[in-house]
Image (cartoon, rainbow, N blue to C red):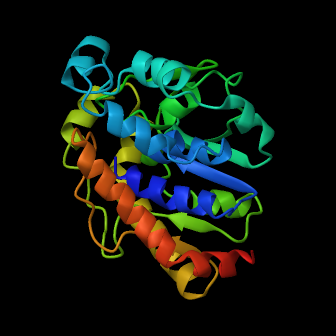
Amino acid sequence: MRGMFTCGVMDVMMENGIEFDGAVGVSAGAAFGVNYKSKQIGRAIRYNMKFCADKRYCGVRSLLTSGNIYNTEFCYNEVPLKHDVFDFEAYRANPMAFYVVCTDVETGKAVYHRYEGQEDSGFDWIRASASMPVVSQIVEIDGRKYLDGALADSIPIRFFEGEGYDRNVVILTRPRSYTMKSNRMMPLLRAKYKKYPKLVAAIENRHRVYNETLNYISQKERAGKLLVIRPESALSVSRVEKDPEKLREAYEAGRRTALARLEEIRNYLGS
């Protein structure tokens, strides 16, 4: 739910006509980022504030009954198809490429999938990218098994550069001072995923990969070859936040940050 900061940044950029040739989202960044391609300003903050405290949306009850802390049926069917409709037509009409990152549980490697819309396995690629370990079921698509993309590649800047994108804006949800620590839940994770040793190895090494990527980003940022948008301080929002006002606070922090840097963003992109 720190991704509400990202939503605030995205909405300001959309409101000001800032467009991209491509985007890539990981975990919540995938679930919320699709709204940039469908050009649905305000959608992500709207439905999250409305349903975050709803037992049908997320919580222990859903985890115990379905194995998913975010209820699959409600989050990926009812909300986007009935309650706050996702505009698949607009998504398909926008030429911007949108990629989601998932982790293949059998190889422990990141999978970068260009998501084409409803005909592309429904919302399963988005769900897979955002399926946190332990509190989510493994998602199977075309015979492969996936979990949260952040386990293998939390900030896929090198992937995007490899695809030829050379003027990138990176939105982070942690302040500049943040470094990731080793996972304290490794004993539980080893037991839970003992059938998938390469996944366990990826999770065990995640903090090293993450921190090395942060160093890479900082070097590119100092050289003026990357524009990074991040909160000034830690966001007071939990991973499964039930207080809609805390979600709004994170969202507004993103908006303020983007508005303060709007001209810088335009100049960097040459727009």
Image quadrant assignment for residue 172: bottom left
Location of residue 185 in the rendering, given as x and y in whole percent from the top left corner: 20, 42
Quadrant into which the C terminus falls: bottom right
Which residue reaches farthest top?
Answer: 65
Identity of the residue drawn at 77% across and 62% down = 164
Q: Is residue 229 visible?
A: no
Identity of the residue drawn at 47% across and 53% down = 7
Location of residue 168 in the rendering, given as x and y in whole percent from the top left corner: 65, 68
- Image vertical order of residue 123 relative to residue 236, above or below: above
Q: Is residue 74 visible?
A: yes
Image quadrant assignment for residue 100: top right
- Image vertical order of residue 66 relative to residue 137, above or below: above
Location of residue 166 in the rendering, given as x and y in whole percent from the top left corner: 73, 70
Q: Nearer the viewer, residue 99 or 209?
A: 99
Q: Nearer the viewer, residue 34 or 50?
A: 50
Image quadrant assignment for residue 137: top left
Residue 39 relative to residue 10: left or right: right
Residue 175 relative to residue 228: left or right: left
Q: Nearer the viewer, residue 54 or 193?
A: 54
Identity of the residue drawn at 76% across and 35% down = 92
- Image vertical order of residue 115 relative to residue 17, above or below: above
Q: Nearer the viewer, residue 104 or 163?
A: 163
